[in-house]
Image: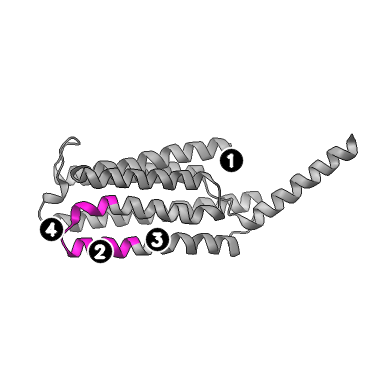
Amino acid sequence: MDKKQDQLNELREIRNLMERSSRFLSLSGIAGIIVGVVAITGVAAAYLFLGLGFSEPGYYQFASSTFAFLFADFMVVLAVSLFTAVFFAVRNAKKRGLPVWDSTASRLLINMMIPLAAGGIFCLILWHHGYVALIAPATLIFYGLALINASKYTIIDIRYLGILEVVVGLVASIFMEYGLLFWAFGFGVLHLVYGIKIYFKHER
């Protein structure tokens, strides 16, 4: 009986080693929670700047000068989110004795950046042609595709988050006038739920 248990323990250890070598396991639930809060705050700042109530649609109908603020607002949210994700990923890696940067992290980043870069270029094209209302849905869709594409190199929860982001983006493309609210739900609420789940599942 003891011999059989030892063999099972050895198999578990081998599986853990294989998983560590093939998947990036340092993603942080706390980072997901912070990113969600930052995204919701960014959308709230946009509504306050535009003077809209949260039930009022048509944010994209304002003068083009307001888009400079929206772009700056988005860039601040993006910068804070990236910094938070990297900071907590590095902290988790050190805490678990995992490498901060290796071939798996590199593959994760490359597979995530390809859809994100394509999405960023596509959003600039939409802006150029005046299809501003489709930018918020497009960011959700391409972000979701990036998560799905990168999920094979990290925890499976990322794939589910990506699928939900794509769905929210598609629905947002139908109700374009409420793009900011869908953006708050996709990048804010979904990240909050994801972060809480990951924290209690992997970090608690």
Residue matched to label 4 = 65
Residue matched to label 1 = 202
Check if mark 1's residue and mark 4's residue have beta carbons within 8 Å: no
Residue matched to label 2 = 124
Q: Which amino acid does label 4 sit on?
A: Ser
93 lies above or below 204: below
Check if mark 3's residue and mark 2's residue have beta carbons within 8 Å: no
Q: Judging from the image, what secondary structure is the residue with disc 2 in?
A: helix
Question: Gap in Å between the C-alphas at discs 1 and 4?
Answer: 44 Å
Closer to the eye: label 1 or 4: 1
Q: Judging from the image, what secondary structure is the residue with disc 4 in?
A: helix
Question: Gap in Å between the C-alphas at discs 3 and 2?
Answer: 14 Å
Left or right placement of residue 86 versus residue 97 in this view: left
**Disc nearer the start of the sequence (3/1):** 3
Q: Would you say residue 131 sits in the magenta stretch? A: yes
Left or right placement of residue 120 versus residue 83 in this view: left
**Disc nearer the start of the sequence (2/4):** 4
Callout 4: 10 Å neighbours few (<14), some, many (20+)?
few
Residue matched to label 3 = 115
Question: Gap in Å between the C-alphas at discs 3 and 1?
Answer: 27 Å
**Disc nearer the start of the sequence (1/4):** 4
Q: What residue is drawn where x is 11% and y is 51%?
A: 62
Q: What residue type is labelled 3?
A: Pro
Question: Gap in Å between the C-alphas at discs 2 and 4?
Answer: 16 Å
Closer to the eye: label 2 or 4: 2
**Disc nearer the start of the sequence (3/2):** 3
Colouring style: one colour
32 lies above or below 67: above
